[in-house]
């Protein structure tokens, strides 16, 4: 329940603000790659939105002011691997905003989450590029003592943007989840045993802290009443429960600990920022809980038994797919109906 | 017995807008100087308009009956002050229903001479039927806004065992403070009025339900309830806590659907102002000629509550509050959530007018353009009926009326909580009202179509009977049918028609040849 009436632009702006701590932590650990992607996505997004609106003969300035583009472009920028060439992000934004949003009818009319639609389009069209995470050398080599934010690293990140640069294999880096999926069991156990030290610039702690930051950002949104608790709690609880169910330490296949599933990849941002996109989620509270459960199951299943490295986009899109049927069949009880109450006289008297 | 626990007023949703009542509650209820002219509408409830029982030119005294209610739910009308009747069929365009209504015009003479009053001092000596007759004679109706004749309401539950009688003092809508002022200063009238109603309906438990933030009113009520079996029920201050069915659930736990009435579950709900009016009618013998009205809004220098006579032009009251016409934009009656804008301030106060608000550009700015619905669900969070306003909007806009009705459009009480919280500033209630009207028009059309179809089918049946009767007659009397009848009975056949025409042409030819 809201504390005060807000406008759409305020709501969207709050969502953007809630991601800032996490983006800051990400930049601190891994360099400006993500920031570059975000700025590029927003800039291209503005252009695409403005031209789409003018093609649809709608007032451009007024509709740009509702900040909905800001959120979609931001999420797509965060999802893009740092070190992606500029044309990859541009293509993604073009698809996400132009087709994923405006071809369906603009704000409030799209069935699929635009950012995730754009991401999936890129994932299917450019699978290799979308799974290559290029970080500046300084982020990968903590012993060197060079900060990812140093001039050299900044320059390296910028150079990745222009696809001319060929990338040395050794500069690729993956999330802890990806590592655990592809690595052997002993290496995973070793990785998990190390203690958390925020000043040690390992990829592991970077990802962990980013996820904690998304969690806090999401809780902030919950507290000020921008989002309701139903979807995030359902997603996180489902991922937690399924990962607990299938977790077998010392088993033949390495499925990862529950902590890894919640904080080792993109679950937090998925639960609080992507799945809660109001336009594409289910409407009523019971339907939202089911929606969250479906997404949670898909996240875990595709991650563990599918061939994709992370599954938030596909899981959310599948949830969007199910939302209309959930809305049709799952409806809350209207006040005064559904519960039988003994009446002493025939109704309609008087 | 007094209760300190604050109950939750709404099971679902609700909002807490700024109440804007402090301005009118700063001072006591003011008596009103007589206006020069009183305009008294004859159609006070949905039923037939009351029949005037005075003529033009008659001199009437205060409290004199000037129109008698007709029909099962008629309402009597009394002269609020002494004066001369100058018109009994004035056509006025009232805001109710949007069409013109008949009104009686009364020119006051300033003397305010009144008929003597006689009421029942001790109600214990009287039966329920006598009390109800007294209420009926006084023309008391629901002062909370609906205006249903109170005597009819009481009479309908004479044969029932009433479990609860609730007095609705939860004035939840912003700007309206007339009930709170009434309770603050005259709590005993409300309490005694509740006792009168209890005697009339034989209710087992009586509760006065009030929002917990009305401190002065609660203190006054506690004092007035010291020697009574009536209990006080505090509910949390939310809008729309004062809605009848929500109040019923808060005070008794019983939920009823939109079509049901509280009497279906052996409960009766009366507004606090109505209870005070019933007290006046029964104990003092005073008919319903005045009510408390809250006058507020930024253009008024001194917003206050008035004890206003029915029929007072609203402009008279606005002038008494020192209205600044330079900033005055518009006027509405009621509260800021469900109020209705007035086409003119010359319109009078009716028995159901609880508040008048003068607007300016600052407190009531022009609404922003509506953006697209982002399906955030804040409206569903706010809806007290637990509906899905975003779905209702979609169906209303796309005219999918069957789906809208299926999602509970008829259960919408049009409280406006959804529109209040909408970030895209969509005027949701307007869409629902438009959809409801279209559905009503379609249903009426369908019903008419059904009736026409039935009439046509019956006409066919009658015709068939007629033909059979004629055939029978011919068979009895041996009379042959006329050509027209024969032709009318047989089904049309093109060959036969051609043959007839050819035969006629041949006959004409023959005749001509014969002539030549």
Image (tube, helix red, strand yellow):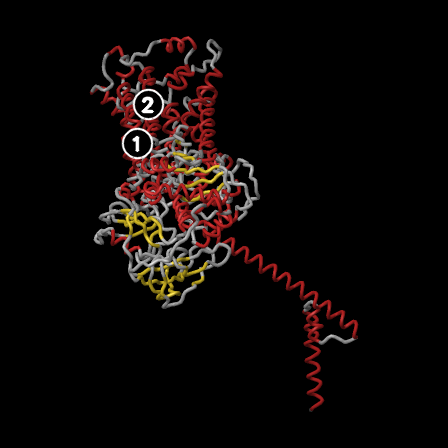
Please give the chain letter of the residue carrying mark 2.
Answer: A
Q: Residue at x 61, y 59 (%)?
A: B454
B22 or B490: nearer the eye?
A: B22
With A202 as the anchor, is A249 left or right in this view?
right
Q: Is B143 placed above or below B70 here?
A: above
Q: Residues within 10 Å of mark 2 (few under 14, many from 20)?
A: some
Q: Nearer the viewer, residue A90 or A291?
A: A291
Query: In what quadrant of the picture does the C terminus of chain B appear?
Result: bottom right
Other residues around mark 1 within 10 Å, as few (<14) / some (14–19) / many (≥20): some
Q: Mark 1 — on which chain does it sit?
A: A
Q: Which residue position is annotated with label 1? A: A14
Q: Is residue A123 above or below residue B121?
A: above
Position of B258 with respect to B22 (left or right) is right
Mark-to-mark CA distance, 1 and 2: 13 Å
**Quarter of image, res B9:** top left
- Residue A216 bears which disc, if any? 2
Q: Are marks 1 and 2 in contact (CB under 8 Å)?
A: no
Of residues A132 and B387, which is closer to you in this image?
Answer: B387
Q: Is residue B290 above or below residue A310?
A: below
Q: Is residue B298 visible?
A: yes
Res A125 seen here: no
Task: Please state the horizontal and vertical placement of residue B443, each as a whole percent of the image.
Answer: 52, 53
Q: Secondary structure at mark 1?
A: helix
């Amino acid at each position: 329940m809201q504390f005060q009436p807000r406008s759409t632009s305020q709501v969207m702006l709050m969502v953007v603000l809630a991601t800032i701590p996490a983006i800051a932590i990400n930049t601190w650990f891994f360099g400006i790659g993500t920031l570059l992607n975000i700025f590029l996505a927003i800039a291209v997004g503005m252009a695409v939105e403005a031209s789409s609106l003018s093609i649809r003969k709608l007032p451009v300035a007024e509709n740009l002011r509702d900040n909905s583009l800001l959120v979609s472009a931001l999420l797509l920028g965060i999802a893009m691997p740092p070190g992606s060439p500029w044309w990859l992000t541009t293509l993604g934004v073009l698809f996400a905003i132009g087709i994923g949003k405006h071809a369906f009818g603009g704000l409030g009319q799209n069935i699929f989450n635009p950012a995730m639609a754009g991401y999936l389009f890129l994932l299917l069209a450019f699978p290799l590029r979308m799974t290559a995470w290029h970080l500046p050398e300084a982020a990968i080599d903590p012993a060197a003592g060079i900060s990812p934010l140093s001039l050299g690293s900044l320059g390296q990140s910028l150079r990745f943007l222009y696809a001319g640069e060929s990338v040395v294999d050794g500069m690729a880096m993956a999330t802890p989840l990806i590592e655990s999926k592809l690595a052997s069991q002993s290496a995973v156990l070793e990785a998990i045993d190390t203690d958390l030290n925020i000043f040690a610039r390992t990829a592991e702690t970077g990802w962990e802290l980013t996820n904690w930051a998304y969690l806090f950002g999401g809780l902030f949104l919950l507290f000020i009443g921008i989002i309701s608790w139903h979807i995030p709690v359902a997603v996180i609880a489902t991922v937690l429960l399924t990962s607990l169910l299938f977790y077998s330490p010392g088993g033949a296949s390495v499925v990862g600990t529950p902590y890894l599933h919640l904080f080792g990849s993109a679950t937090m941002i998925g639960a609080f920022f992507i799945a809660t996109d109001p336009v594409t989620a289910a409407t009523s509270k019971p339907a939202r809980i089911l929606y969250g459960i479906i997404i949670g199951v898909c996240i875990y299943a595709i991650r563990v038994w599918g061939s994709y490295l992370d599954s938030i986009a596909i899981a959310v899109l599948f949830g969007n797919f199910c939302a209309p049927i959930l809305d049709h069949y799952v409806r809350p009880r209207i006040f005064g109906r559904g519960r039988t109450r003994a009446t002493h006289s025939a109704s309609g008297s008087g | 017995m007094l209760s300190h626990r604050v109950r939750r007023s709404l099971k679902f949703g609700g909002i807490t807008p700024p109440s804007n009542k402090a301005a009118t509650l700063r001072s006591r209820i003011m008596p009103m100087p007589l206006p020069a002219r009183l305009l008294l509408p004859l159609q006070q409830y949905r039923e037939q308009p009351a029949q005037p029982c005075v003529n033009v030119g008659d001199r009437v005294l205060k409290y004199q009956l000037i129109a008698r209610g007709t029909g099962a739910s008629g309402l009597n009308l009394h002269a609020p002050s002494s004066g001369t009747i100058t018109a009994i069929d004035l056509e006025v365009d009232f805001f109710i229903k949007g069409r013109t209504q008949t009104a009686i015009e009364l020119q006051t003479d300033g003397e305010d001479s009144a008929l003597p009053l006689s009421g029942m001092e001790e109600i214990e000596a009287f039966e329920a039927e006598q009390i109800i007759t007294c209420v009926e004679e006084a023309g008391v109706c629901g002062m909370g806004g609906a205006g249903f004749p109170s005597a009819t309401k009481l009479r309908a539950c004479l044969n029932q065992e009433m479990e609860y009688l609730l007095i609705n003092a939860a004035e939840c809508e912003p700007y309206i403070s007339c009930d709170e002022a009434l309770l603050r200063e005259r709590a005993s009238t409300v309490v005694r009025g509740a006792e009168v109603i209890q005697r009339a309906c034989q209710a087992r438990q009586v509760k006065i339900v009030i929002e917990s933030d009305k401190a002065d009113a609660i203190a006054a009520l506690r004092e007035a309830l010291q020697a009574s079996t009536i209990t006080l029920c505090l509910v949390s201050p939310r809008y729309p806590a004062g809605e009848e069915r929500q109040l019923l659930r808060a005070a008794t736990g019983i939920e009823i659907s939109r079509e049901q009435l509280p009497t279906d579950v052996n409960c009766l709900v009366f507004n606090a102002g109505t209870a005070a009016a019933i007290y006046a009618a029964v104990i003092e013998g005073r008919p319903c000629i005045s009510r408390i009205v809250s006058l507020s809004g930024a253009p008024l220098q001194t917003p206050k509550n008035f004890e206003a006579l029915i029929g007072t032009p609203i402009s008279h009251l606005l002038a008494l509050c020192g209205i600044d016409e330079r900033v005055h934009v518009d006027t509405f009656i009621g509260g800021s959530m469900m109020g209705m804008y007035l086409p003119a301030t010359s319109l009078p106060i009716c028995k159901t007018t609880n508040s008048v608000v003068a607007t300016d550009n600052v407190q009531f700015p022009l609404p922003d353009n509506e953006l697209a619905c982002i399906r955030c669900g804040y409206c569903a969070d706010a809806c007290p009926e637990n509906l899905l306003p975003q779905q209702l909007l979609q169906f209303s806009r796309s005219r999918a009326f069957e789906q809208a009705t299926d999602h509970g459009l008829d259960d919408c009480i049009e409280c406006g909580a959804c529109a209040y919280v909408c970030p895209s500033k969509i005027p949701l209630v307007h869409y629902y009202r438009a959809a409801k009207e279209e559905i009503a028009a379609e249903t009426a059309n369908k019903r008419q179509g059904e009736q026409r179809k039935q009439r046509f089918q019956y006409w066919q049946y009658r015709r068939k009977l007629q033909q059979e009767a004629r055939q029978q007659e011919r068979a009895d009397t041996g009379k042959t049918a006329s050509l027209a009848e024969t032709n009318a009975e047989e089904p049309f056949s093109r060959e036969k028609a051609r043959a007839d025409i050819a035969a006629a042409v041949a006959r004409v030819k023959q005749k001509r040849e014969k002539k030549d």
